[in-house]
Image (cartoon, coloured by chain):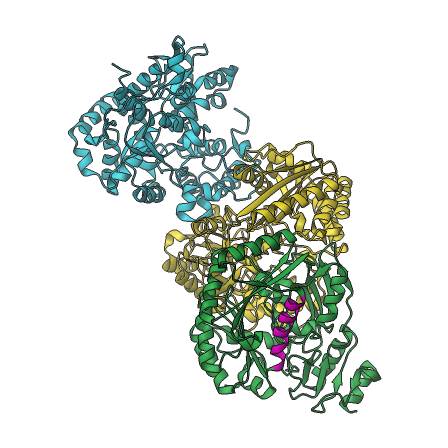
Chain colours: A green, B cyan, C yellow
Amino acid sequence: MSLVDRVRALLGEDAVDVAATRDGVPRVAPGSPDAVALLLGTAREEGWRVRVEGAGTWLPADAPADLALTTRRLDKVPAIEPQDLSATAEAGIGCDLLRQQLADRGTWLALDPPGLAGRTLGSVVATATAGPLRQGFGPVRDHLLGVTFVTGDGRLVQSGGRVMKNVAGYDLTRLAAGGFGAFGVIVLVHLRLRALPRADQTLVLEGSREDLAQVAEDIAAAAVQPAAHELMSPALARRERWMLAVRFAGSAALVSAEEAALRAATGGRFTALRADEAHALWMRAAESFATRPVTFRVGGLPDSSDELIDLLQHQVGDEWVSASPGIGAIRWGGETTVDRLRRLRRTLAGLEVPLTLERAPWPARAAVGHFGAYREGVGPLVAGLRRTFDPGEAFVVAVEGTE
Amino acid sequence: MTDRGGFEGLDSCVHCGFCLQACPTFLATGDESDSPRGRIELMRALETGELAPADPGVALHLDRCLGCRGCEPVCPSGVRYGRGLEAARALLTEHRGVPPLVRAALGVLTGTGDGSRILYALTRLVRATGIPRRLVGWGRIRFAMGMLAATKPQGGGRRWRAVKGGAPATDASTALHRPPPPSPALLFRGCVMDGLFSHVHDATIRTLQVNGYEVREVPPQVCCGALHAHAGLRDEARRLAGTNIAAFGDDDTPIVVNSAGCGAMLKEYGHLVAVGGRGEAFAARVRDVSELLAERGPRPGAPLDVTVAYDPPCHLMHAQGIAGPPERMLGAIPVLRVITLPDAAQCCGSAGLFTLVEPAMSRAVLAPKLASLAAARPQVVATGNPGCLMQLGAGLAAAGVPAAVRHPVELLDESYRAAGYYA
Amino acid sequence: MTGGSLAAALSEIVGARHVRTALPERVTYARDGLPTHRHVPGVVVLPGSRDEVVAVVRLLAALGVPFVPRGAGTGLSGGALADDDAVLLVLTRLNRILAIDPKNRLAVVEPGVVNVRLSAAAAPHGLLYSPDPSSQTACTIGGNVAENSGGPHCLKYGVTANHVLSLEVVLADGRIVQLGSPGGEPWGPDLVGLFVGSEGNFGIATRISVRLLPVPRAIRTLLADFSALRTAGEAVSAVIASGIVPAALEMMDQSCINAVEDSVYAAGYPRDAAAVLLLELDGGREEAVAADAETIAGILRAHGARSVLSAADAKQRERLWQGRKKAFGAMGRLSRDLVVQDAVVPRSALPDVLEAIGRIAAAYGLTVSNVFHAGDGNLHPNISFDGRVPGLKARVDQASGEIMAVCIAAGGTITGEHGIGLDKLRYMPLLFDGDALAAMRAVRRVFDPDERVNPGKVVPVHACREWSGLRIADRGLRIEERGRSLAQSAIDNPQSAIAPRGAR
């Protein structure tokens, strides 16, 4: 029996779309977490190599594989609990649809990941790509109460739960979040929500990067606590010069007080955006990264932000850069080569700064790897964890490069 | 005395560990066996018989307890640690007797041995030569010399001066009202205080007088028995308590004490001598000198230009719960600056005979306090207990920190003298 | 190797003073903050530096001896207990704050640093270490990392895991690994996140880098009192649903209030209240915090608060908080023995769950006192009892089981911050299926293939489904071998501190 026939027998006729992918890999869309488990269990037995896809808008669907497993039919939102500020959503739901459903219930997921609006929740969680709101609301993992994932040998593993605090057993949620699918396919996510902010204000300031770096320091020194505090390159901001965008979200009293503090700390130089302008700014900034072939992130100390951008500029250019100087996180997008990426990662590692390759065409991903240049003792642990969760190496994931 | 001898005081311990950081010996070793919670485990096991008093591992860690009771005021469940410790030590002493060093020290210091008076006189002679001061150091003998030197009145000529032209601050209460007729108070002299700190007794009498007390002597009194009780010699302590209770009579005249250790013990007489409620009645009369003075203000004196680190004795603060009155005493001295050290509430490691019988632990407990004193550089360290005065005096001298040690009442006395109240 | 020679070898590393072999000394380490569990360790060792820890761990690895890391022993799950075939590795002496970096708002500490001391050291820079477990005056940051400790202020600022940036860890075999990066971005998969809360099963964190937060400029502390527990629970839901996130939202019932008010930490809580809520609002802007406090006070009144008091000054605020934080320790006033639970339920379920707990307590004739992190839905029912009464402990255990079942049925979990340890092992299969448990065990074996660090905790091995590379039979054989070699060592040296279970 062919692979396609076998899968059809397992999951039904309509679960497989043979012509869907550009490279001719049959695409399978299981309709439930159990179906995912069944498929991967079979893959383990048959030795199939599986690549995982969401909506296909972020990580290119180009890894060589025997079949492509897409989560797009796992798009239900079983629970939104405004009283508890929690929700449970399947991994294949698009972020835009989820956002709408949450807003209808007065709730908000304080994540603004890069990429197109329809990017799946599972993709955001698996790659731990947080956007500018990471300044005020933390990285992706801080929004997760639990996940359920399917391992490479088809076991459904639940971790965490839907309550606010949970230390029952080891925190496998942390492993799944940002694991780039190396440890399993995320099928279900329990989310920590916030109330939809009553007020949401964005202010911007243009200037030279040096000038804005100083302003960013003034903001930090004045203990202004923005939801986002993002330094954007001119191309990203679609302006002549660099731009510092500051966003406040919360109660009306909080937003107006913070805004006043920002103006006081910076001599009133910021311009407030209208809601539609602000929406367009953040949306464009997020989507721009989906249009460049390569995206990576680096995470340094806040006081090294400026030097790190200098370093990026020198080694790979700084056309598409978005940085949160308050927390030392920087995202880079653009075109570059495998050699440059490898060299940059080595240089950064010498500064104790990790480079995580977020997206790139398969050949570059395979060569550079999402991760690399680990610190002391980490490599064997990662290898051990991969063996644990994917003993048959079913998942085609470029965890580490080939260097 | 209850039938469980004090062990019942430990029953409410739920092992939360909130006492750990309040324990000087735990801070020194980081070892649960040297913590209040660990020792409570040992004491409970002693009571149930799970561990034998003969076990050296039990004795080691109970002996290493300073008895400072710093754990009691932080305990949310109100564990009576001190009571349990005395019960446990009584069991240990029953089994092994009193170590010779402790026995000898008790004899010499507390006046229960022959020739105590002669020895004190000789000691004062040695002290007067100034030789101990020159021998100060960290070894057992040299540290003892430091302790002795610290008892010397006016501490080797390092006196601070009254502010030139300073006058007593106006005292509205005494200016407007005629002072009430003096009320009587009976002085508890104690043994070490009387032998080496008679100048503090003098200062106590004078300052109380200025504040409207008439201090009377009670000749047939004896040692309070604290050192005996800590050494597990409850019967001896009870005997001494009986003598004191008889000596001080049955009326309600306050009994004034200027040694925190004695005061804490005297206030425990109710627990020690439960028969007929006599101990309790006695205990209710006991007042620290700072309490009596604070009740009357005390009357402000003349300014003293001096920086003072106040170090509350454990037996004043933890055992008697007296924190404010000593500060009010110092507050009655204009210009004088009080600095509060972050770890002031922690034991200095003196703890009665502890400094003699557990010198290593005692010095380890003292070390952090000396370090913060060296950094703060006060001119005077004030504390209201003879053991602490000697321990801190010796430690400061050995560490080369140029600060004198004084009983707070000595400072007030000096201020009153400068104000001309004694003229 | 015999116990005597093990102690000698350990003494060579750390000095004889820091190796404890006498029975009384080991007895003092037999419990943690949940004293219903009692296990006397074989040997206690207190290394004084990172290098000594590494040397001790390598020695134990070479000998195949299991060990249990321990901080201050304030844990509430029987997690830091070692059996007499294991070494208890106590980290209280590693208590240095290695660095405070005000510019990057981080600190690097050794594991034995006491939680509250870090905040004290950061205070001159206007910073604090946010996770504030109630035992913060005693517990260590190493222990906090192992348990992923919470605390009242985790409602707004997150638990320990949200504040740990990077870790230096000594694995069971003595290898040193560096997890995470100085800025907190994971380096590869989030191994810091995986390590935090692993209850000592993955190794010993010898260096911990944590995030510091600015001390809030504006604070409002509110005390609301209610005449019924249920009303207080409903008020919690209303506050959460308002969208304002308090820094802390705590509840105490009458039994707890009275225990605290009888203690030196008396805070002025109304003794006639069925429950009080203690709320804190904080932030960088006075006017915003004041406005939020007004809104919240209104919500509380609208939901049945008899009165809402706002702390007048820092002193009163401190008193209100000390009362709350020492409540657990004050439980000894009710009875000499105590078990405490740590379930978390969805916040909207609080009123029903609290009522159910009350019913269970009444049915078993037990005193249950509730003092807990209501804003997180993290319950701490304390059952007070006298263990000397025959059969009472069994009844307490049954009641505990029923309370747990109610919480799980409400969509909750069995522990929010205390950890599984020994105490909650029996509940793990109620929450996780055999695959999830097996996955956890397999992950543990990546860090510690022999399952030698803190053995027997967290994952109930019998409930694990078979997992690739993890055959139950292997484990059985190994244990048998170990048993034989231990028996031999006991014969070699009958006084051996390391002796097979039951030999003493």
Q: In this view, does C137 lie to the left or right of A386?
A: left
Residue segment shown in magenta:
A276-291
Q: Which of A245 and C320 is in front in this view?
A: A245
Q: Mark yes or no: residue A150 visible.
A: no
Placement of C481 over or under C98, stated as above or below: below
| Residue B22 % position (x, y) | 46, 41
User: Farthest top residue?
Assistant: B181
Q: Nearer the viewer, residue A87 or C294?
A: C294
Q: Which residue is drawn at 58% across and 76% down?
A: A238
Q: Which residue is drawn at 58% across and 88% down?
A: A363
Placement of B251 over or under B104, stated as above or below: above
Q: Which of A319 and A289 is in front in this view?
A: A319
Is A279 contained in the magenta span?
yes
Q: In which quarter of the image is residue C459?
A: bottom right
| Residue C266 % position (x, y) | 58, 34
Magenta span: predominant SS is: helix
Q: Mark yes or no: residue A263 visible.
A: yes
Q: Quadrant of residue C200?
A: bottom right
Q: Quadrant of residue C367?
A: top right
Give the quarter of the figure containing the N terminus of chain C. Answer: bottom left
Q: In this view, does C121 lie to the left or right of A73?
A: left
The total number of labels drawn is 0
Q: In this view, does B119 lie to the left or right of A103?
A: left
Q: Nearer the viewer, residue B142 or A73?
A: A73
| Residue B107 % position (x, y) | 31, 26
| Residue B84 % position (x, y) | 50, 33
Placement of C294 over or under A37, stated as above or below: above
Is C29 contained in the magenta span?
no
